Image: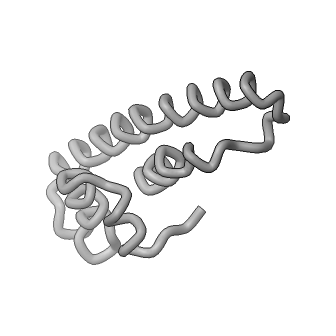
Amino acid sequence: MNYSARQARELTSKSEWELVSASNQGAIGQLSEKSLRSNIERTRRLRDKNRDPYRRQQIASRKRSGANPASHAPSNDAHRAEGADLR
């Protein structure tokens, strides 16, 4: 799922937004190899951190409502969106 910069900014913390903005095409070419590796590792950790609550909420929602696996709870969109931003 694609998000505009404004939507991504609203979903992320200040430090997460700095990481996202450092990952755009223009900025990424200016990073040293060490900084690039560090950003990759940090992005993966943040993605995993945000993916886990999304999955737990998704499972809990299915158990409560008896919904099929393809559906998700609207309250879960923020975690899903933030995880998607950090891919």
Image point (18%, 52%), residue name: 15
| Residue 49 placement (x, y as % from top left) | 39, 32
Q: Quadrant of the N terminus?
A: bottom right
In the image shown, does 10 or 49 lie closer to the viewer? 10
Residue 52 horizontal/vertical position (percent): 49, 29
Name the residue at the front extreme: 64
Q: Which one is nearer the viewer's eye here, 28 or 10?
A: 10
Which residue is rendered at x = 53% and y = 47% of the image?
Answer: 80
Q: Quadrant location of residue 23?
A: bottom left
Measured from the top left, where is residue 21 in percent x and y? Answer: 27, 66
- Depth check, front residue: 22 or 11: 11
Where residue 64 appears, x then y in whole percent?
72, 25
Determine whether 16 is above or below 22 in the image: above
Number of labels in the image equals 0
Residue visible at 33% across and 70% down?
Answer: 24
* Residue depicted at 37% across the width and 57% down the height: 11
Q: Up-down: is 28 above or below 35?
A: below
The quadrant holding residue 14 is bottom left
Q: How is the image coloured?
A: one colour
Q: Is residue 17 left or right of residue 80?
A: left
